[in-house]
């Protein structure tokens, strides 16, 4: 018997097809939640704590594309999990009247889960989009690493950070309760979630267990698409969302019929935007072609 894969995932609404793949279609894997996100999964892959990660496109690509990555980088992009862009909501504290709009954030303190995480990378994309970047200068006065969504919310209320970015529907519950306030949003200019595999599984062609994962995930996606009511029930019962918000999210998300493979133009497009935003350096780090298996 092959050893079951250890799969890192973010325990949010997007994980529902993965849950269905295991529940109904015999996915033989240990699912390991990473509530602090993709940056933490990169660390875990490099430490051989997980074999597969399902996380955010920009974080995976930034993790491989930075100069000075040790060894072979630890993982490669092997599959596509979500076709649609991600809506990053920009949040501040409930009682921060001085932060009225996105313009107020220039030169402020950005809260991130980890250096290299999606919340970190998208800060630079936001700065680039708003014209806040100048050569040799950081767009924000401080980058405050807070690890968890809960600590990010606390930091914008205490003043430790001025703002942070997190997925819209995961944030919405805390707008509705008045804990934090929404000041804007930014969409990723790329499809939002990718599947990566440890280089131990990609060196001699793709490990058969990864092929099996794609087959079972495709069935999980098909089940999700055919059973929205069940998906809403699972999300609202087991994850931190209302049924109403889960239904609204369903209108915004598309999972691929075939999860295996990554479009090279998505990766090269992301790399070029991350270079423009100063996350990656031109002519340094891994090429976009080398990131994909």
Image (tube, grey):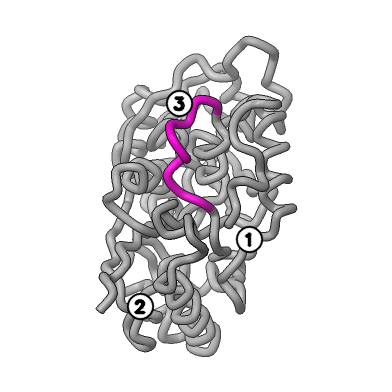
User: Quick one: 135 or 101, which is closer to the camera?
Assistant: 135
Q: Which labelled disc corresponds to residue 234?
A: 2
Residue range highlighted in magenta: 67-76
Which quadrant, please, contains the C terminus? bottom right
Q: How many marks?
A: 3
Instruction: Find the distance from the CA under tag 1 to the CA under tag 3.
Output: 35 Å
Residue annotated with mark 3: 162
Q: Quadrant of residue 134?
A: top right
User: Quick one: 6 or 73, which is closer to the camera?
Assistant: 73
Which quadrant, please, contains the N terminus? bottom left
Magenta stretch holds residue 74 = yes
Residue annotated with mark 1: 262
Name the N-terminal-most of marks 2 and 1.
Answer: 2
Q: Quadrant of residue 9?
A: bottom left
| Vertical side of 281 occupied by 209: above or below | below
Question: x%, y% of residue 213?
Answer: 43, 74
Which marked residue is nearer to the observer: mark 1 or mark 3? Answer: 1
Name the N-terminal-most of marks 2 and 3.
Answer: 3
């Amino acid at each position: 018997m092959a050893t079951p894969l250890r799969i890192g995932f973010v325990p949010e609404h997007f994980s529902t097809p993965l849950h269905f793949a295991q529940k109904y279609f015999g996915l033989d894997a240990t699912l390991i939640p990473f509530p602090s996100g993709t940056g933490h999964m990169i660390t875990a892959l490099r430490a051989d704590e997980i074999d597969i990660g399902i996380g955010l496109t920009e974080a995976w690509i930034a993790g491989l594309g930075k100069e000075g990555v040790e060894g072979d980088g630890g993982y490669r992009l092997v599959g596509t999990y979500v076709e649609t862009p991600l809506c990053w909501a920009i949040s501040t504290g409930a009682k921060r009247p001085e932060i009225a709009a996105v313009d107020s954030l220039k030169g402020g303190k950005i809260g991130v889960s980890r250096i290299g995480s999606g919340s970190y990378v998208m800060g630079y994309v936001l700065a680039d989009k708003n014209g806040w970047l100048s050569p040799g200068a950081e767009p924000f006065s401080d980058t405050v690493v807070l690890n968890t969504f809960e600590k990010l919310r606390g930091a914008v209320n205490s003043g430790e950070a001025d703002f942070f970015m997190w997925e819209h529907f995961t944030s919405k519950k805390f707008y509705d309760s008045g804990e934090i306030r929404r000041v804007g949003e930014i969409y990723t200019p790329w499809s939002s979630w990718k599947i990566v595999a440890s280089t131990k599984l990609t060196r001699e062609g793709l490990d058969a267990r990864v092929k099996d994962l794609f087959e079972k995930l495709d069935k999980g996606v098909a089940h999700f698409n055919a059973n929205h009511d069940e998906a809403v029930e699972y999300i609202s019962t087991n994850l931190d969302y209302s049924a109403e918000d889960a239904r609204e999210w369903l209108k915004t998300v598309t999972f691929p019929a075939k999860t295996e493979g990554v479009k090279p133009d998505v990766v090269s497009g992301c790399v070029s935007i991350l270079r423009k935003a100063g996350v990656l350096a031109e002519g340094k780090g891994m090429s976009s072609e080398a990131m994909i298996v």
